[in-house]
């Protein structure tokens, strides 16, 4: 069993795609409508959890308890895959630009605060701030890789936690 949490418009075949359908005017295909911040799941049954570009909607003090909850859902050697914007890369991009449209655009300030359909960002992560939370939640291994889902490795990073 694999879960795609906060799936949005990124429906993944072979996964149970879960979203509360609050964005994009609900124009998304899901298998299970739920708020991933409050939902529960059976423990020790999930092989993989994908959380693509939702970490920015989770506040600093909300992330640890969520990772601990999701950790319990995973089987031994199960994994969580998190892709999100990299605060350091976003800041470097903003500092390197002089064009206001670029500074405020999808690789800049929008990543920090959201815009239109992405409003409500609460936090921005980097590998150095997210990895310790995965270890604290019980993950035995944490790997950092290039972004995959939004195909923007200069802005985003991928983190895999293994139970």
Image (tube, rainbow, N blue to C red):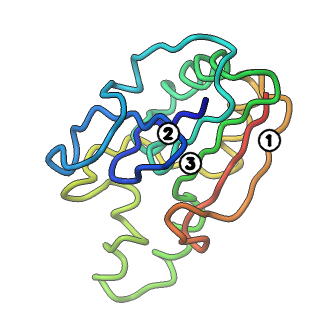
Task: Evaluate if marks 3 and 1 touch, with contact meaning CB atoms under 8 Å apart.
Answer: no
Residue drawn at point x = 75 percent, y = 53 percent: 144
Residue drawn at point x = 34 percent, y = 35 percent: 19
Horizontal relation, residue 60 to residue 19: left or right: right
Name of the residue lying farthest toward the front: 14
Question: In which quadrant will I find the C terminus?
Answer: top right
How many marks are shown on the rendered structure? 3
Quarter of the rendering containing residue 155: bottom right
Horizontal relation, residue 144 to residue 65: left or right: right
Q: Which mark is residue 4?
A: 2
Q: Secondary structure at mark 2?
A: strand
Residue 1: image location, x then y, percent: 61, 29
Q: CA distance from mark 2 to mark 1?
A: 19 Å
Name of the residue lying farthest toward the right: 140
Of the two numbered discs 2 and 1 in the rendering, the one whose residue sits closer to the viewer: 2
Q: Which mark is residue 142?
A: 1
Pointer 1 local density, CA inside 10 Å: few below 14, some 14–19, many at least 20: some
Q: Earlier in the sequence, mark 3 or mark 1?
A: 3
Name of the residue lying farthest toward the bottom: 99
Pointer 3 local density, CA inside 10 Å: few below 14, some 14–19, many at least 20: many
Quarter of the rendering containing residue 131: top right
In the rendered image, which residue does mark 3 sit on? 125
Q: Secondary structure at mark 1?
A: strand
Horizontal relation, residue 55 to residue 153: left or right: left
Pointer 2 local density, CA inside 10 Å: few below 14, some 14–19, many at least 20: many
């Amino acid at each position: 069993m694999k879960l795609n949490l906060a799936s949005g418009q990124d429906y993944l075949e072979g996964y149970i795609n879960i979203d509360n359908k609050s964005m994009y005017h609900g124009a998304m295909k899901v298998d299970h409508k739920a708020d991933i911040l409050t939902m529960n799941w059976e423990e020790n049954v999930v092989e993989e959890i994908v959380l693509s570009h939702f970490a920015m909607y989770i506040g600093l003090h909300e992330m640890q308890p969520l990772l601990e909850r999701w950790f319990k859902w995973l089987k031994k050697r199960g994994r969580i895959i998190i892709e999100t914007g990299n605060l350091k890369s976003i800041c470097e991009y903003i500092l390197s630009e002089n064009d206001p449209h670029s500074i405020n655009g999808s690789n800049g300030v929008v990543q920090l605060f959201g815009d239109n359909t992405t409003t409500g960002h609460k936090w921005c992560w980097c590998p150095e701030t997210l990895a310790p939370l995965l270890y604290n939640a019980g993950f035995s291994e944490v790997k950092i890789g290039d972004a995959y889902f939004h195909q923007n490795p200069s802005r985003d990073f991928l983190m895999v936690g293994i139970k």
